[in-house]
Amino acid sequence: PRSTLFPYTTLFRSTTRAHAGRVAVRVDNAAMTYRALDEASARVAGLLRERGLAPGDRVGIMMPNVAEVPVVYYGVLRAGGVVVPMNPLLKAREVAYYLGDSGAGLIFAWHTFADAARGGAEQAGAEPIVVDPITFPDLLALATPDFPVVDTADEDTAVILYTSGTTGQPKGAELTHGNLISNTEVSCTDIVQAGPDDVIFGGLPLFHVFGQTVALNVAVAAGACLTLLPRFDAGHALQIIAGHGVTVFEGMPTMYVALLHRPDRADVDTSALRMCISGGAALPVEVLRGFEAAYG
């Protein structure tokens, strides 16, 4: 049996020690090493401590696939908080529901979605923290980094993921630190077989369990590079696959269809790919066969 005092963030810190100088996250030409991600997330933890966060407190994250997502995600976890990932396209009343239902008192929101986040936070009595590439680094620079990881048990909640709400109000599914560890280990070791030389395509939304587990957490567990695409576009995706030497592609069936129908696909070097994973819905057999034929 595992230790009962093994927060998921311990895995992140061990990766940082082993691969500090390696690139953890890329967004086009910008890159962040594991050392930089460790310090930035420690500053988020310090910021949260200064704002009175206690272990077990919920924190919303409402952002597209940008480098600030892992910074805040691991910052919340290392402070002992609970991450509540949210679709950045939510309206203010939906934001208010997610915050109120989860009990989140803080929400980190990407600047282009700040109006809905502020409106929902006001309704729910929560504090919004607007994240943008200019002012957010300055905010973190003022915070004292909190490097130690708060002790949490395997059964303590780490993340609350909400259902789609197709038959009623969305319901929060709680993932514990033990869940994150076991899900990541199975995905990393048995499915992806990821290593530090891998480059994992991060086009799946990180607020969804597929992208969060099999892309973000697997990359960090393996010391691999996660290359992010904030909004999926097949042409941009092919540029990233070729330019960043992507070895593991993860997508939903619609992404495979879009890549399959790119007229310029033969002109792009995708030879670094060693594995492609589909999820979120059933992949039609004709798409599977067509993609294998087109991309090898």
Image (spheres, grey):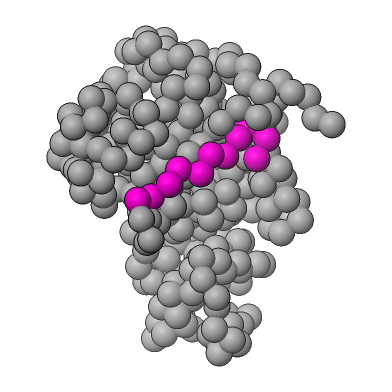
Instruction: Name the residue: 57% across, 48% down.
Output: 213
In percent of width and height, residue 61 lies at 37, 37
Instruction: Name the residue: 35% across, 51% down.
Output: 169
In percent of width and height, residue 187 lies at 68, 53
Q: Is residue 284 above or below residue 162?
A: below
Q: Is residue 57 visible?
A: yes
Residue sitting nearer the eye, 275 or 162: 162
In percent of width and height, residue 14 lies at 68, 28
Q: Is residue 288 above or below residue 245?
A: below
As drawn, the residue found furthest toward the right would be 1
Q: Is residue 270 above or below residue 34?
A: below
Instruction: Name the residue: 25% across, 38% down.
Output: 96
Residue sitting nearer the eye, 221 or 281: 281
In percent of width and height, residue 167 lies at 38, 61
Instruction: Using the rendered view, name the quadrant where residue 258 is placed.
Output: bottom left
Span colored in magenta:
169-179
Instruction: Using the rendered view, name the quadrant where residue 125 is placed.
Output: top left
Horizontal arrangement in the rendering, residue 143 relative to residue 117 (left or right): right
Q: Is residue 170 magenta?
A: yes
